[in-house]
Amino acid sequence: MQSWLDIPADSHFSLANVPFGIISHAGSGGARVGATRLGDWAVDLSVPEAAGLLAEAFEQKETSFFAKPTLNDFAGLPARIRQNVRLAIQSLFRSNSSLPDDLHSRAVLTLDSVETHLPFSIPDFVDYSIFPAHALGAGRAIFGPQNQMPPAWNALPMAYNGRAGTVSVKNEIVRPQGQTRAFSAAREVSVGSCQALDWEFEVGAFVAEPTQDGTVLTPSTATSHLFGFVLLNDWSARDVQAFEMVPLGPFNGKSFATTISPWVVVPEALEPFATVKPPRLEGTAFEEPEYLREKEGAKTNYDIECTTTLHLASNPSTAEPVAKANFAQAFWSFPQLLTYQTYSGARLQTGDLLGSGTISNMGDRSQGCMLELSQGGKVPLKIGGEERRWIEDGDEVVFSAVAGEEGGKVGFGELRGKVLPTSTLRMA
Amino acid sequence: MQSWLDIPADSHFSLANVPFGIISHAGSGGARVGATRLGDWAVDLSVPEAAGLLAEAFEQKETSFFAKPTLNDFAGLPARIRQNVRLAIQSLFRSNSSLPDDLHSRAVLTLDSVETHLPFSIPDFVDYSIFPAHALGAGRAIFGPQNQMPPAWNALPMAYNGRAGTVSVKNEIVRPQGQTRAFSAAREVSVGSCQALDWEFEVGAFVAEPTQDGTVLTPSTATSHLFGFVLLNDWSARDVQAFEMVPLGPFNGKSFATTISPWVVVPEALEPFATVKPPRLEGTAFEEPEYLREKEGAKTNYDIECTTTLHLASNPSTAEPVAKANFAQAFWSFPQLLTYQTYSGARLQTGDLLGSGTISNMGDRSQGCMLELSQGGKVPLKIGGEERRWIEDGDEVVFSAVAGEEGGKVGFGELRGKVLPTSTLRMA
């Protein structure tokens, strides 16, 4: 699929992608507007929308879905309309099309002339744990090599509610402080700056159309309630988490920051890379229940290569990949997660965010967090001539994920996160 | 404090109370507006505000804080202004004052002519466990009589993130379905309608002024960030919770519904009933950390009598009190909870809701949930000639809580919740 716009062949944002995001720029008077990204361009979608170029797709003459500070109104539209709008945007940039000069100059913007913002107002954030390698590896890093999978693993997708109010698209986070239990042999308890700060490489999914209280979805009907996907870093203070989490689960150890990539990749763009899920685990106590079961051979996973790179504070130009994993190893699909959430009768709201949990595969250097890579800080990772048990102040972790081949790549770009020291916190 | 309005002497809503809420009524054209409650009257506050009667207190000529569908904008104002506005409202209804006839007829409404609504848009809901009797009793009901307090109990307030999107002021909830582990000796796992539905009697607190990311409060500076309090029912599917909650905490077992009372009682109204907290527990492993410590003798608890009444489906006119407990036994104060949340660097937003956890005292029939009252369903409660291990379809549980004496009572009114059958759920 060729475009008249100059899009590098290795870009994650080929014309096959067409993700959605929120930007502000000088031409919008600083107002936040809906946008897409093509190659190294950001496109202010409120411009073609105001010019009526999307009216047919919206099935309405005058709309302002992209003249809004979030994607919530757009995402709340029926799937048919959302999909047609994306196809109409794609058409505008195909080789056989063009944009009038005045629209071009107002809509097509260089990346350095725009600021990206949180794409949604997020009513609820739920974080899952759908990768068996992580459930096993993280458990063993904390509780020892004899630790088994959680007993309910095969029966339901494990989850906890996260803090929606600290989800952001920031590129920096502040090392939190808290009440900690060390990962040393003595497991000392103390109070102060986190000494075991970690990232978690996840994919996040945003909810499109809402449901009413008491409406229960199936894996098949849940599909149209998925708007799209981002990369998500579930920053974790492992030593805070270790002290607080029995019996109510993680709280302050994960509430201080969750960062996401700004461009939301839609399911239609990932459809060519859909795969079947791995086989059910054997030897576990419980079965997958009927209400969560997908059709035999349903392709609801995606073949997405996920790469974690670390830039050390001491030498930021050294960018060493520390891990690679594929999303296709997910044990539960996002339609199953939505089904699970609604089975109790709970409603979904547009903009609800679901995290996949850490994307880890079996094998060396294929884990999405330090907790697994360094086995709970016991086996330091050798990187660029240094050692890391956990991420340090000034280090920057970069997530990247992509599907497809040169010229037609569909990817998420990068999610970058640099660690600022605890001294950045202010008393009030 | 006497009013020219007719307020029954036993009302929870004496002129000493003046809570805030959100109502709609015919005179507002169905629009949601800010309101207070006095005796059996609801007062539309947008009427005196529009007439300029609150301008001095707001320190602005023309305002429309009460012509909004939630209290968020009002609650975001500095504490001084919020307090002055409440005093100005109180003044309007004192014996020596009056309201012009046209304002009176438009603002002072009978309860049956108004509908109450959720008072806030709620960015995040966090549920704590601050009553030692509950931490001990609930643990023993689940794990057996030898079970001890969680090890970190004395060191930090235990908490989990709840689902903000299912908090409501509804008077009915639907019995959820889920994947359950029975409270029988065999602990069978199955899928379907919850067989161990429970209430949890809590007090909820709403956040007033927000904080910025990275701003850390102290128990003393946190006080002005508290807007006020409601009764909260943290509905719990105990058999769902029992299967899902290791190791990530409760999720679907508590996500289907949380109900709150509609009138938010402010700290100034409860100030005369402030008490010191109970002594720290002895013989526990960890100390309260310096950053959470309050001044010696600080009165940050409240002497509030909490009564749970059950109306049986078989005989709704029988209203039998099943439990009484006092809020003064809380182990951590709300200013401490806010301090704890911000210590990691996480921001607060106006409208954030914090639950106290189940209000239980030591002693017979002084527990805020069936899990404790029936010892995990093992010892059925005898009520109105029937037995209850858990709450049944058609039963209605009523929470009531009040402080003070005849003529000057400050209370929350009632929080009523009736259970509808699982068959009310709809597939989509």
Image: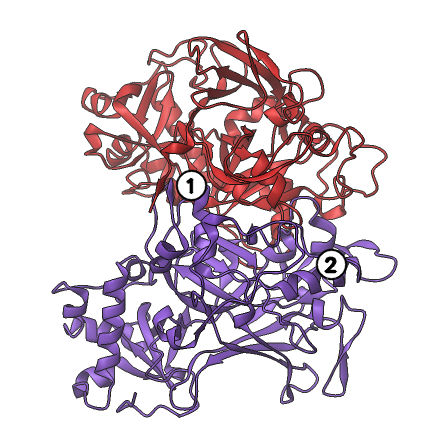
Chain colours: A purple, B red
Give above or below for A189 relative to B29: below
What element does badge 2 sit on?
A: helix
Residue behind mark 2: A239
Residue sitting at x 48%, y 43%:
B208
Asked whether the residues under the numbered discs 1 and 2 touch, taking CB atoms below 8 Å apart as contact, a structural biologist would say: no
Give the label on residue A345, or none. 1
Q: Going by the image, does A360 lie left or right of A2?
A: right
Q: Which is more toward the observer, B68 or A111?
A: A111
**Residue B24 shows in this picture:** yes
Residue at the outermost left position: A61
Give the class, few, some or many, for how many residues have Cα within 10 Å of label 2's Cα (few <14, many ≥20).
Answer: many
The chain identifier of the residue carrying mark 2 reads A
Residue sitting at x 14%, y 64%:
A62
Cα gap from disc 1 to disc 2, whole angstroms: 35 Å
Give above or below for A409 relative to B236: below
Residue B1's x, y, as percent? Answer: 45, 15
Amino acid beneath label 1? Gly
Residue A113's x, y, as percent? Answer: 37, 82
Residue sitting at x 39%, y 72%:
A265
Amino acid beneath label 2? Asp
